[in-house]
Amino acid sequence: MTTYYMVEMHYPATEDRAQFDEFYWKHISMLLTIDGFQSAQRYECTHEARAPFLAVYKLRDPGVMESENYTSKAGRNSVNPTFRAKMTNWDRNLVQGDIADMDVPEGGSMTLIDRLTPDSTPLPDGFTPLEIVGLDATIVQRGVRIGANDTPVEPNEGWAVRTLQPIHHPRYPT
């Protein structure tokens, strides 16, 4: 099982989006210096969504999030207060699943299905299940599918579906 730290949010302040993206690039650089962070990539929805931005970090194991190296440098308070005040629908979920990486190449996409309640319809075929193992635990289960031209998914009761494209290429510790 591979562990991922998934951070999602909405950043509706379009007037300083370029500055926010620049900040986030540097923030990822800092996170990739933490022992146990193995890769990072940011994504943006191709449609309107509650949380259209997503950052995915591959971790060595769930314990990385409780390490002194992480807690002394990162977390919600590590985000610049100017940007933090403008972020909404900000959720952090620690997940595990049988997927080696979630890197999406340029021109590719990622589709996520979030099961919102235990009674939600199960994930459809073709989606890798990701079990929620920590942090905010705002969903019951997440499914992921990565493809070059992802086929749309019909919404179901109790699901939130997002299709995302990469904002930048996958990044790795230097």
Image (cartoon, helix red, strand yellow):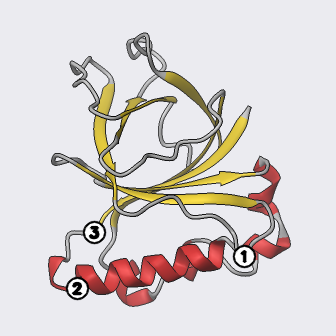
Q: Identify residue for label 2.
A: 16
Does dot 1 land on a helix, a strand or a loop?
A: loop
Q: Is residue 153 left or right of residue 126?
A: left
Q: Determine if residue 96 is in view.
A: yes
Front in this rendered view, residue 92 or 146: 146
- Neighbor class of circle 1 (other Cα within 10 Å; few <14, some 14-19, many 20+) is some
What residue is at 29 percent from the left and 29 percent from the top? Answer: 150
Q: Identify residue for label 1.
A: 33
The location of residue 14, given as percent across then percent down, is 16, 76
Calculate the distance from the C-alpha at mark 2 to the C-alpha at mark 3. Answer: 10 Å
Q: Determine if residue 135 is in view.
A: no
The location of residue 126, given as percent across then percent down, is 44, 15
| Rendered position, 150 above or below 122 | below
Q: Identify residue for label 3.
A: 11
Front in this rendered view, residue 149 or 4: 149
Report the amino acid beneath label 1. Thr
Q: Nearer the viewer, mark 2 or mark 1?
A: 1
Q: Is residue 150 left or right of residue 60?
A: left
Give the quadrant of residue 73: bottom right
Report the amino acid beneath label 3. Tyr
What residue is at 26 percent from the left and 82 percent from the top? Answer: 18
| Rendered position, 45 above or below 2 | below
The location of residue 39, given as percent across then percent down, is 63, 58
Give the quadrant of residue 148: top left
